Image (cartoon, rainbow, N blue to C red):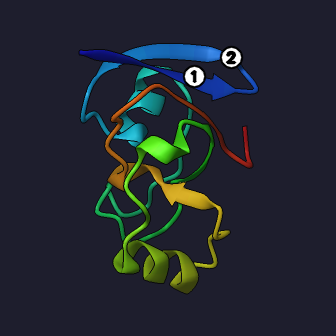
Amino acid sequence: MELEIRFLPSDRRVRVARGTTLLDAAQRAGLPVASACGADGVCGRCGLEILEGAASLSPASDWEERVKRDNRVAPALRLACRIPCTADLTVTAPYW
């Protein structure tokens, strides 16, 4: 089953397989997403804001919350390298 991931404000859209990380989806859309740790989920730089579809995602784990706190990532952002897409999503980043 393919899902549609929409990126604002560019309105770029990609279709991805269920389970594809949000980081991979953004890269497929040709959008830059910071990631100093090689997608290991420790740098916190890949934070994206989920505008639509957040209810379909698992809540942030204690580990994700700790990484965000340690790296001063806004609480509303989710780590794109750790978020598997499970439904259609609309997302944005503070630097796009």
Q: Which amino acid lies under the numbered mark 2 shown in the image of this protein?
A: Asp
Q: Is residue 82 left or right of residue 48?
A: left
Number of disc labels: 2
Q: Above or below — where is 11 with respect to 51?
A: above
Residue at point 65%, 62% (across, down): 76
* Residue 56 locus on image (x, y percent): 43, 42
Answer yes or no: do the residues labelled 2 and 1 have beta carbons within 8 Å? yes
Q: Which residue is depicted at the point 41% across and 48% down?
A: 57
Q: Quadrant of residue 23?
A: top left
Position in image of residue 95 (x %, y %):
73, 46
The residue singled out by tag 2 in the image is 11
N-terminal-most mark, 2 or 1: 1
Q: Nearer the viewer, residue 15 or 27?
A: 15
77 vs 62, left or right, is right
Q: Secondary structure at mark 2?
A: loop
Q: Which mark is residue 6?
A: 1
- How many neighbours does mark 1 have within 10 angstroms: few (below 14), some (14-19), or many (20 or more)? many
Residue type (three-letter) at the residue carrying disc 1: Arg
Name the one closer to the observer, 87 or 8. 87
Quarter of the image with the N terminus is top left
Image position of 20 (left or right of 74): left
In percent of the image, x 56 and y 29: which residue is there?
A: 31
Question: Where in the figure is residue 71, as x and y percent of width and height?
Answer: 56, 79
Q: Is residue 84 above or below residue 24?
A: below
Residue 7 lies in quadrant = top right
Q: Is residue 3 above or below residue 79?
A: above
Where residue 8 sits: x, y (%)?
70, 28
Residue 46: assigned label: none
Residue lying farthest front?
A: 55
SS of the residue at dot 1? strand
